[in-house]
Amino acid sequence: MRFDEFMRLALYHPHYGYYSRGDRIFGSEGDFITAPGLSPLFGQTLGRALGGLMEGTSDGCKPVIYEFGAGDGRLACDILSAIGGQVEKYNIIDLSGGLKEKQAERIQRELPTEIASKVNWLHELPDSFDGIVIGNELLDALPVRRFAWTNDAVLETFVTVDDAQKSPYPQLTCIDLPAAEDITEFAKQLLVKHGPWPSPYRSEWGLEARAWVQTVTQKLRGFALMIDYGRDAEHYYNHTQNQGFLRAHSQHVAHDGFLEGIGLQDLTCHVDFSGIYESIVYAGGELEGYCTQSAFLRHHGILDLAASDAQFLDPLEGGAHRQAINMLLSEAEMGETFKVICWSKVIPMPEGKLHTGFIQHDLSHLL
């Protein structure tokens, strides 16, 4: 099977997929920690930005949030703790379904009843997104196709049974086969724009992420904001990146053993934000801003929130909180690798803090 088909089964199979394991995958005892798990100030700062957007829109954007891939529910709790009074409804869309129970438990435990009652779970895409769509580390978890460019041909990666292995259990292996016309043409276009490349040159095509963005944008009446790790195409497909950006994650270790522990480890891939931008425009959306996570959080006052937090200021116990903020903002950690991209459809972004922040820290010229 094609690699993206394998990746989809490994991550999203309803019984054996990685995301069917529930909240065991998160935190220090799991496989990774996301920004909401580092500090509640991440979600509260994002909530500030969304709240300002709701206040500033006078021509019809509903105070409704749609969160995709809500994880263990921390981000929803932190956003609603900041702007729960402004939000009419908070919809969680998590098609894997394995985390709903844990999300509900956290929301009921941490939020007042009148705020928790605004949270709703959707198990399929609505006909339209009338409000604000958000996602943190969503796009990197969507299946990718892998290709290998050589001096002689363009190849695509497939997963198959390794008949050479003498084992009582079937062993899988990756093989490169002649690529289909669509990914061949894609690789050739990239080579013209970003080559020359060494032979072989391996990378990924995030076609599913592009399709997801296109679908959301077609249904959108309002705004969408995604936060994820990635880069623009010029840096993504640079000749130095000849092994691509697909990684497996297990117990906080990143490696390239993609076929190990199937269903027991995460598979992720950096986002090609230039491709995301193309999908936004193709679906009739308007790019409103693209900047680093560090610039976004600083502009919306994460350090002000931290300075007013007694735990953060404590000389002894505050060390862990200060370290978490440093990870969110530092160029050497998440601050520069993670990007924020925001777009609109039908309703233009109003003037306000979010708008001025994107103007001051704009990187959209790279896309």
Image (tube, helix red, strand yellow):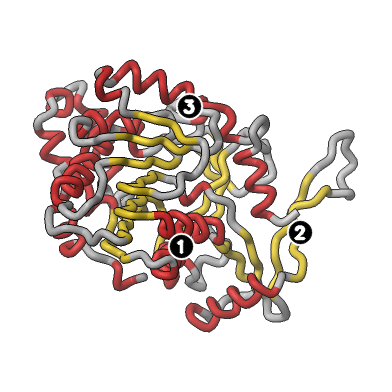
Numbered circle sitting on residue 353: none
Q: Residue at x 21, y 60 (%)?
A: 358
Dot 2 or dot 3: first in sequence order is 3
Locate residue 75: give its quadrant.
top left
Q: Is residue 246 left or right of residue 109?
A: right
Q: Residue at x 69, y 74 (%)?
A: 181
**Label 1, label 2: how many angstroms apart (C-alpha)?**
24 Å
Instruction: Decide which of 43, 217 is in the foreground and name it.
Output: 217
Image quarter (top left, top right, bottom left or bottom right) of the C terminus = bottom left
- Expressed as whole percent of the image width and height from the top left, the position of residue 365 reads 30, 73
Q: Which residue is mark 3?
A: 100
The residue carrying pointer 1 sits among few (fewer than 14), some (14 to 19) or many (20 or more) residues within 10 Å by Cα, namely many
Q: Which residue is mark 1?
A: 272
Q: Is residue 166 left or right of residue 336?
A: right
**Label 3, label 1: how many angstroms apart (C-alpha)?**
29 Å
Closer to the camera: disc 3 or disc 1?
A: 3
Q: Residue at x 36, y 64 (%)?
A: 285
Note whether 342 is above or below 116 in the view shown. below
Q: Which residue is mark 2?
A: 175
- Expressed as whole percent of the image width and height from the top left, the position of residue 148 reads 66, 68
Note whether 360 is above or below 269 in the view shown. below
- Expressed as whole percent of the image width and height from the top left, the position of residue 30 reads 50, 28
Tag 2, which secondary structure? strand
Note whether 293 is above or below 121 in the view shown. below
Closer to the camera: disc 1 or disc 2?
A: 1
